[in-house]
Image (cartoon, rainbow, N blue to C red):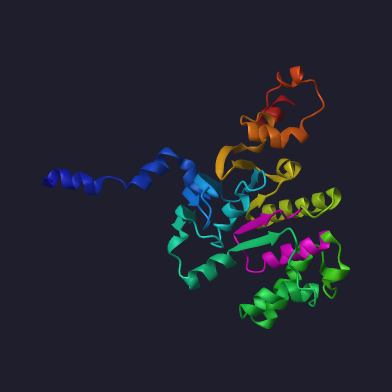
Amino acid sequence: MSTANARVALDAPPLEAVRRQLHPELNNAHVRFVGLHKTYPGQDAPALADIDLNIQHGEIFGIIGRSGAGKSSLIRTINRLEQPSGGRVLIDQVDIAGYDEDQLVGLRRRIGMIFQHFNLMSAKTVWQNVELPLKVAGVAKAERRRKVEALLELVGLQEKHHVYPAQLSGGQKQRVGIARALVHDPAILLCDEATSALDPETTESILGLLRDINRRLGLTIVLITHEMAVIRDICHRVVVLERGRIVEQGEVWRVFGDPRHEVSRTLLAPLQPALPQSLLDRLLPTAPDARAALV
């Protein structure tokens, strides 16, 4: 290579920089999946295949799909509870594949997680359940007290600090789970079927709390659910998985208003209004901003 050609090669922007110029949304990507694959031992079919996806800072992002579509496998790669078989997972543009044990501990403290079945310790009070992760991390007693008080107030359980889980309703148990997930001031909150065990009224209450947390704390929230109404009511964008692959993604108003894949249409059928199909076929979704402009 000549000196001139070598200088051009050295001066050329890296491929990643070029990609960012062409796709400016990557600059705000909080979580990014690039060519992600996951195959479990003893299984021929991949649990995840060719996943390319960006989740933006501060958004509430939904993942939907039928049972076995790969929803849980996908979010569990974000905190490395699942190790991908191929591809990359980037948090704030950093590939987490090479993290050692200490780095993984730090990563998981930045990523809170709440579950369908609450996972509370029955022999500990509400206060003790929330305090436990701080205690394990060696946080000083005064700081633990300050943090637990603030979190119980945030989730509306300051009057229940002395109560045991058996004395709580399902919604109250999930509020404890949310408080516990926030003890390390995470930047990302993963919700794995967090409302599936709750009645509709309690579900709406928990969704209201998650909206408030998203707004007040600026958290990126990623949730998976089989309840399409949950996605409709809280999420900004959504991805539809089928057999480990992305079949559709976009803003919720667009995907729910004009589903383009058969799986999406099947999942969303229960939400369709009771109108004749001939009329439904003539209706086109309108962006929220456009609707506001028409008022």
Residue 226 locus on image (x, y percent): 71, 46
Quadrant of the drawing holding the C terminus:
top right
Whether residue 192 appears in magenta in the rendering, the answer is: yes
Instruction: State whether residue 168 is above or below residue 238.
Output: below
Q: Nearer the viewer, residue 33 or 179?
A: 33
Instruction: State whether residue 133 is above or below residue 216.
Output: below
Residue 19 locus on image (x, y percent): 39, 42
Q: Is residue 199 left or right of residue 253?
A: right
Residue 131 locus on image (x, y percent): 71, 75
Residue at 76% of width from left, 41% of height from top? Answer: 229
Whether residue 196 appears in magenta in the rendering, the answer is: no
Residue 25 showing in the rendered view: yes
Q: Nearer the viewer, residue 269 or 170?
A: 269
Q: Quadrant of residue 141?
A: bottom right
Q: Quadrant of residue 110?
A: bottom right
Q: Nearer the viewer, residue 39 or 111?
A: 39
Residue 130 locus on image (x, y percent): 73, 72
Q: Is residue 112 left or right of residue 12?
A: right
Residue 255 showing in the rendered view: no
Residue at 77% of width from left, 66% of height from top? Answer: 176
Q: In the rendered structure, which segment of residues is drawn in magenta?
A: 171-195
Instruction: State whether residue 25 is above or below residue 170.
Output: above
Residue at 66% of width from left, 51% of height from top? Answer: 223
Q: Is residue 152 left or right of residue 85?
A: right
Residue at 82% of width from left, 27% of height from top? Answer: 274
Q: Is residue 250 left or right of residue 117?
A: left
